[in-house]
Image (spheres, rainbow, N blue to C red):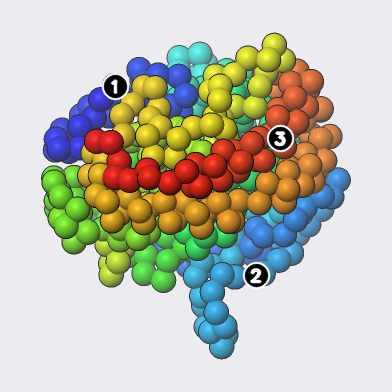
Amino acid sequence: MLTRAHVSIALILLAPLIACRPAGDDADDDELGESMNGETSESDGASEGGTATSTASETDASSADASSTDTTSTSETGTDTGGLPSWPQPCADVYAQDIVPTFSLDFTPGDWQALQWDCQQGGQNYFPVEFGYAGETVAAMARLKGNWSYDCNKYQFVISFNEQDPNGRFHGLRKIMLDAPWYEQSFLHERIAFPLFESLGLPYSCVNNARLDINGAYYGLYVNVERIDQEYLERNFEEPEGNLYQGGVELKTNELVNDTSRRDALFAAGSVDEIAALMDLDQAVAEWAAEAMLPALDNYWAGVEINYYLYDHPTRGFVYLPYDLDIAFGDNAYGDGSLLWPGAEFIDPITYEHPGWLKEPLMQIVLSDAYWCERFVEELGHARAAYDPDAMAEQVTAWADQIEASVLADPHKTFPSSDHTIAIDRLEAFFAERADFVDAWLAQGNHCPGPW
């Protein structure tokens, strides 16, 4: 396992670690080795379009009937700034909650055959493609994605607009990511999980569901989730010029400068004071607590040191960015009643560790400190207050209705439609069970300091 105290060799160790990590550790973006074309913080500007905050219960739009400049909801977090920008900025319009956008990919016969062969070889090579949405068509590149979720029965895609032109963007985005992991049969985990971070004033990814046509035929339904990159930083932060690290290891911005000295110092820290000198610890414990509340079983809080991003904010220090939440809430039961993560609703907010990993050293140090452990518990209380089981269940019902036709018609889904129904029912019941457990845990008290 990658050791933070040896970050100088982490990039060497990371690739084989991902390939053999235990089931459940799907980094999903799979871009640990992808540079951003040497780009710095320069970009086309903040994402355009509407924010993803409205409740959506409309019938699935199989052919996006909203224009590419739809601004269904324009609510922003923060106080009135007299017309000046506030952060976070609204989500790009392709993430609007009241539509299921239909994207299209048109490959040449040769490139389509090559991509299929690429999947058989476990590859993730880019191929040229014509990308379409709501009457717009642009040249793009597309590749397969997924680690544990990699499945040739239903391809998952990264669609890139900046592979050939570093300044290429589509509706303010350099990449579109389409996820459909075989183990997430509701299609709604990330769509339900990220709004909790948003409600707590934490960074978050925009997300909805999207349909995909390939070479003129409906291919399947996906989770359409915002990629963490420079545009994400510009949408979430007023100061987006800092270093961004995927998995805390690979530098994804400011690569030409390549100054990782502050990250190296952070991973070498051996005390709370040393960590606090480099990190926004209030933000860190709030982000960890939100993950614990869900719970996010395949993420940093659980010890999975690849499923997160770390951003070195120019004035606040390091902050944590939630990422890859497809196993938030555990899995939702399969047709035979089995679960990969049984008892997820009863997982301890402090001591839980993913079975294939250990709590991260930095988190151990922080939660072993009585004051910061109590701050974590305090933030867990705030997360619990924002975790409204009834509202979340109602949202699942509304979004399940929105995507129902697309799920039923999906010719490449890797499970029967009946399993999707089971997953939706289980997810709707999960929230109240988790809330009840955390309420009892908080009432019990005496959880600090942590046991490390």
Location of the N terminus by quadrant is: top left
Q: Is residue 413 left or right of residue 200?
A: right
Badge 2 crowding class, 10 Å Cα cut-off, few under 14, some 14 to 19, many 20 or more, is some
Disc on the earlier residue, 3 or 1? 1
| Residue at which label 3 appears | 429
Residue 318: percent from left, percent from top: 29, 57
- Which residue is at the front of the view, 189 or 287? 287
- Which residue is at the front of the view, 213 or 378? 378
Mark 3 belongs to which amino acid? Ala
| Residue at which label 2 appears | 75
Badge 1 crowding class, 10 Å Cα cut-off, few under 14, some 14 to 19, many 20 or more, is few
User: SS of the residue at dot 3?
Assistant: helix
- Looking at the rendered image, the disc whose residue lies closer to the viewer, 2 or 3, is 3
Residue 256 found in image quarter? bottom left
Q: Residue at x 78, y 42 (%)?
A: 397
Q: Residue at x 27, y 62 (%)?
A: 317
- Which residue is at the front of the view, 47 or 427? 427
**Count of marks placed on residues:** 3
For the residues labelled 2 and 1, the Cα–Cα distance comes to 43 Å
